[in-house]
């Protein structure tokens, strides 16, 4: 089934819903980074969270970055997302893997760790980006995103993120949702939705059985005036370019650039998000060095 993200409401607009099937998106991220099983689940959950949160941005020029680092073997996960549903990500140690947890599931909380923070950075074209940070609650990511919304933005939220990794390390199913109570919503409504969520199978299980994201949400919000507002196709997409990599190269400083140029070297830089390589010949490095010198004048 193809990836899809929907935005919807329930209970006459008292509830906002963003939900997505992200199996193909997560598969691409895991393939690029060649992840082990537990790392696949950790990266996949973060990528799914990124695309769900990213579509809340108001402008196509805005970007959202989520970082989680809890001292575990994953050595942190970072994703960047945009309002069109595109997302990219990286994991510090893609080979990090742990035995199943007490529930027999991939130990994402263990591989992430709890000694650290979840940080959300929103760049909306202002002088300074918005930065919100909360302590890691469980390391399972969904719980931590929900806590961020409740503690940092005062928006009661339910967050589910699921990634089902097959025995051959392929991604069998992935998806997630964010359910938020809007201002003025009936206080009892949140409790009712919580009880209903506790009674349904895991999201990844429903997706693996062939359920569409619309069907899953309609099942959860049955008899609750569920309405789909719009939909889009989320995807793993890196926006790196020769120009952006060149700017990063300039940032290493005139002294180091001069040493590289004088040694007659050719340098190859690789994008950490998509592994695409960019080659800089010695002649090209010379032009960059002159550009760096001219900027100082």
Image: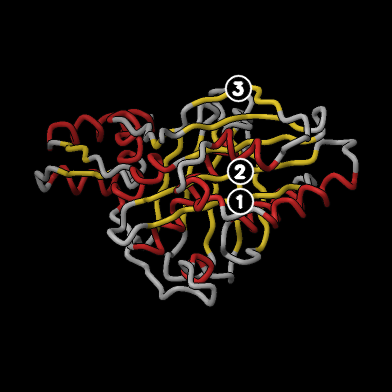
Q: Which residue is mark 1?
A: 160
Left or right of 111 in this view: 271: left
The image position of residue 91, as x and y in percent, is 40, 56
Mark count? 3
Q: Are marks 1 and 2 in contact (CB under 8 Å)?
A: yes
Q: Residue at x 25, y 40 (%)?
A: 276
The image position of residue 275, as x and y in percent, is 27, 44
| Earlier residue among tags 1 and 2 | 1
Q: Are marks 1 and 3 in contact (CB under 8 Å)?
A: no
| Earlier residue among tags 1 and 3 | 1
The quarter of the rendered structure image containing the C terminus is top left
Left or right of 48 in this view: 138: right
The image position of residue 141, as x and y in percent, is 57, 57
Badge 2 density bin: few <14, some 14–19, many ≥20, Cα 10 Å? many
Badge 1 density bin: few <14, some 14–19, many ≥20, Cα 10 Å? many
Q: Which mark is residue 230?
A: 3
| Earlier residue among tags 2 and 3 | 2
Left or right of 19 in this view: 291: left
Question: Residues under labels 2 and 3: Cα distance?
Answer: 15 Å
Q: State the residue in front, 198 or 143.
A: 198
Secondary structure state at the residue bearing disc 1: strand
Q: Is residue 196 above or below residue 227?
A: below
Q: Which mark is residue 177?
A: 2
Secondary structure state at the residue bearing disc 3: strand
Q: Residue at x 49, y 65 (%)?
A: 108
Q: State the residue in front, 48 or 94.
A: 48
Q: State the residue in front, 282 or 69.
A: 69
The quarter of the rendered structure image containing the N terminus is top left
Question: Residues under labels 1 and 3: Cα distance?
Answer: 20 Å
Q: State the residue in front, 268 or 45.
A: 45
């Amino acid at each position: 089934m193809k990836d899809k993200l929907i935005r919807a409401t329930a209970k006459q607009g008292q509830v906002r819903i963003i939900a997505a099937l992200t199996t193909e998106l997560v598969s691409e991220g895991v393939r690029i980074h060649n992840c082990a099983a537990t790392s696949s689940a950790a990266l996949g959950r973060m990528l799914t969270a990124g695309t769900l949160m990213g579509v809340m941005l108001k402008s196509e020029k805005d970007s959202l970055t989520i970082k989680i680092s809890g001292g575990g073997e994953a050595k942190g996960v970072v994703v960047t997302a945009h309002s069109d549903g595109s997302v990219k990500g990286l994991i510090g140690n893609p080979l990090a893997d742990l035995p199943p947890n007490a529930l027999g599931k991939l130990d994402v909380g263990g591989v992430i760790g709890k000694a650290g923070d979840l940080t959300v950075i929103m760049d909306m074209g202002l002088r300074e980006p918005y930065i919100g940070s909360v302590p890691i609650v469980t390391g399972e990511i969904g719980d931590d995103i929900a806590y961020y919304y409740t503690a940092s933005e005062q928006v009661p939220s339910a967050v589910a993120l699921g990634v089902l990794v097959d025995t051959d390390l392929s991604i069998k199913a992935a998806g997630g949702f964010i359910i938020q109570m809007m201002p003025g919503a009936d206080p009892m409504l949140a409790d009712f939705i919580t009880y209903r969520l506790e009674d349904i199978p895991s999201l990844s299980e429903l997706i693996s059985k062939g359920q569409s994201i619309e069907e899953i949400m309609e099942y959860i919000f049955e008899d609750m005036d569920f309405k789909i507002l719009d939909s889009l196709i989320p995807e793993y997409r890196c926006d790196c370019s020769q120009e952006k990599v060149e700017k990063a190269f300039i940032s290493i400083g005139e002294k180091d650039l001069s040493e590289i140029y004088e040694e007659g070297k050719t340098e190859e830089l690789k994008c950490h998000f998509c592994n695409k390589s960019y080659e800089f010949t010695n002649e090209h490095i010379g032009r960059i060095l002159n550009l760096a010198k001219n900027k100082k004048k």
